[in-house]
Image: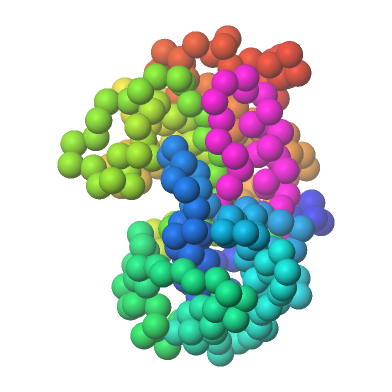
Amino acid sequence: MNPSLPALPLDDWEPAKDTLHLWCQIIGKTKLALTSRRNHWWNVPLYVSSRGLTTRRLPLSARNLEIELDLVGHRLVARTTDGESGFDLVDGLSVAEFHTRFFAELRGLGVEASIWSVPFGVPMTTPFPEDHDHASYDPEASGRFLTALQWTGDVFEEFAGWSNVKTSPVHLFWHSLDLAVTRFSGRRAPAIPDADPVTAEAYSHEVVSCGFWAGDPETRFPAYYAYTAPEPEGIGESPLRPDSARWVGERGGLLAVLPYDTIRTSADPRGDLLAFLNSSFDAGAALGNWDVADHATAWSPTPNP
């Protein structure tokens, strides 16, 4: 077992994960309100830092703002060029109280932001200012989650570096609380019938996307995933590595899924995760008729691990 990869069973911290998820949505929506729009909503995600999850630098009129969920010191920290403020993350801190205190801290720093205070893309529907039910925080589990994100992010960065064409940053989308990296074929995708504006922009071009999430009501365990959009016919017959990876049906399509515990207990976690990422990409790129040679860099491994 790799001692650097901790266990992260969903059942042990699901209430705390859901609360953390909603806190991230409040921060992420604030980032959305304060930034210029980028292709594929790349102005929206959060990033894994050395201590937690951060917006990175956000522009203000004459100074900058950064917001961080510090999962080491267990604090919400908001800092500007000329000041810093925050409050402790503790068990019992409800989403409603977090929402109130968060915007009070921003106003104290001279920052005004307005968001649509309703959860997005999750089963929870109570508006943030009214949500007193989600009020769990587990410092130890949050720290383990951060460790998993940091290690995974490092491997995703290596994988991203093996492509010579358009590739997303390694970032955390707060609507589903998943760490993701996406490669693009370079071709525009067919329009998705009746797609909402978020989906239409996210999938305006052909992609193979890979990620990690801590589990959800449908998938009751932390896992790595990959998918191709548009999904090519027959992709579910493509081989995946390592052997414990599987194609599973998810929301009308197919996901390649590899349990996090497979990687956590592997004798070669990095090699096995890279094998999963590469086999998932190879499946989508081959059946999607991508110019795979155009993706290769001088330092990409041959053959892929």
Q: Taking 189 as reference, is 47 above or below it? A: below
Is the image coloured rainbow, by chain, by secondary structure, or in one colour?
A: rainbow
Left or right: where 255 falls relative to 179: left
Any magenta on residue 172?
A: yes
- The residue lying toward the viewer, choosing from 277 and 239, is 277
Residue drawn 71% across and 33% down? 158
Quadrant (top left, top right, bottom left, bottom right) of the C terminus: top right
Identify the residue at image location x=54%, y=83%: 104
First to last magenta residue range: 147-173
Relative depth, front residue between 136 and 108? 108
Q: Residue at x 42, y 88 (%)?
A: 132
Which of 276 and 58 lies nearest the eye of the viewer? 58
Locate residue 56, reporting x and y percent.
64, 55
The answer to whether residue 61 is visible is yes
Extreme-left residue of the structure: 194
Residue 238, quarter of the rendered image: top left
Tell me where residue 189 appears, x and y as whole percent: 33, 25
Residue at position x 64%, y 31% in the image: 160
Whether residue 6 is visible: no
57 or 77: nearer the viewer: 57
Is the residue 253 above or below the residue 114 in the image?
above
Q: Is residue 160 magenta?
A: yes
Residue 168 image-quadrant placement: top right
